[in-house]
Image (cartoon, helix red, strand yellow):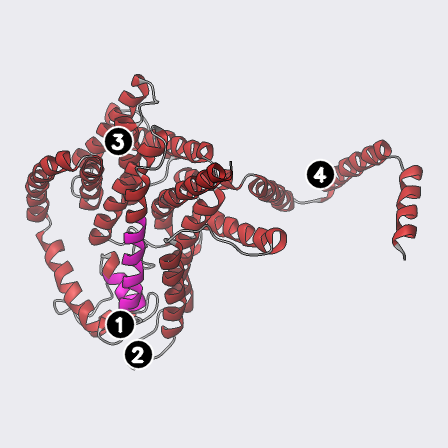
Amino acid sequence: MTDLSLMRLLRNFSIQYPQPWLRQLLVMVQLLFIAALAFGASQRQLTLILYLLLGIGLVLTFLRWPPLGLIVTALAGMVVPFTGPSGLNVTVILVALLLCLWLLDMLVRQRPIRLGPSRTVWPLLSFLVIAFISFGVGQLNWLPFALHAPLGAQIGGLLIVILSVGTLLLMANQVQDLGWLSRMTWAFLFFAALSVMVRSVLPLLGLSRMEFFQQMGSVFYIWLVAMAFSQSAFNRDLRLGWRLALGGLVLVAFYVLFFLKFADKSGWIPSLVCIVAIVGFRSWRAGLVLIPVAAIIALYLTTGVVSSEEYSFSTRFDAWSIMAQIIKINPVLGLGFANYYWYTPLFPIRGYAVSFNSHNNYVDIVAQTGLVGLVCFLWLVWEVGRLGWRLRKHVPAGFAQAYVYGALGGLAGMVAAGLLGDWVLPFFYNVGLNGFRSSMLGWLFLGGLVSLEQMVIRQKLTAAQK
């Protein structure tokens, strides 16, 4: 059929069936379809159809406004209680969906796959490539008498790396103006404040806390403290009342961490590091004064923790010495994801042949992806920190500059949290996939730094073209 005949057919069709009539017909068909479902479909089928329609609506919304998808994903982990097999949760599902939509959009609409020009992309992609190689290496039989981790557990460990890297890339490439970055930050702080009040403060007042907000890990408090403190201290575009409210939120967060969760050192130590880092990045003189003060406070507080958890500390050192023996099997590329957990019974700890994990992100990275993986991860930390240090002088004063200082503090807090547990990249058999609800927030806000970098680059290009 030629183009001319096709056009004639379409024209005849439009004459015979005018557009308003077609619209009425579609409405009638939809009503009949709904009526048929109401009479003939079971309750389970109706529920599935409802979920399908909601899913289609979400997909169309995220395609139209990608940053909105990131906001929904960050907040959904705090409030949606769904936990599936192996800790599968709504945050994992939504990040995977956003990644698929982004890749599909680049392949179908944009065609050439392009990432924002940033030095952070290279360590990110290198770490991702090493993760895939180590996953393949993990299929080899390194210890003849040891069991391998089930394939599902290995895929789960790899998935955590993929989704973490993907979250940073999504944020860096899909948030293209300061308005969306601002909305995301304020939405997080609002929901985080509600979470802290509902879960921790209301019970002290004798009120029901209502299981509306989910349990969140160390990274949640790191970014709550980092963003609230930096905006309160450095965003002079905010009214005084809002700045005081943010300062009060920081105090409430530290009250919860110090007095209600003091034994959880992974909570208050990284948050304290955040404050010191933000002040030090802002003014090295103030940092020099604050560092010894913070060190004395931390030493005093840590002494109490160590005395009460001496057994926990000593067993961790024993575990790390055993981990060193396991890592020697393949120190370059590691043993693959989750495998070392199944090797540990061959190396008894204090006479017990049990499975255990390292409770340390850096040991986990070496054990699973080798020294090459650790180098790529530390390279990423260096490039992100270097980017934040450079951006603090090139972004507008107010929200953007406060965001940069907050991100630098958050990065320092995550580095500290990695020493105390697998909070940054959850280990499958410990914090697990459910911990991604919290850990993704760090990758999200660090991606905001790269997003700011792209905004500065575009602004300079526009100014140069004028």
- How far apart are the two marked residues, 1 and 2, measured between alpha carbons? 10 Å
Circle 3 sits on which residue? 229
Q: Which residues are magenta?
A: 363-384
Q: Which quadrant holds residue 30? A: top right
Judging by the rendered image, the residue that carries numbered circle 2 is 142
**Crowding near the residue tagged with mark 4, few <14, some 14–19, many ≥20 C-alpha atoms within 10 Å:** few
Q: Which residue is mark 4?
A: 38
Establish if 239 lies above or below 441: above
Q: Would you say the residues marked 3 and 4 are in contact, meaning their CB atoms lie under 8 Å apart?
A: no
Foreground: disc 1 or disc 4 = 1
Mark 1 highlights which residue?
A: 343
**Which amino acid is tagged 2?**
Trp
Tally the marks. 4
Residue 453 is situated, as x and y percent measured from the top left of the image, at 39, 43
Instruction: Please name whichever residue, 332 or 217, is drawn nearer the observer in this view of the structure.
Output: 332
What secondary structure is found at the residue carrying circle 4?
Answer: helix
Say whether residue 260 is left or right of residue 112. Answer: left
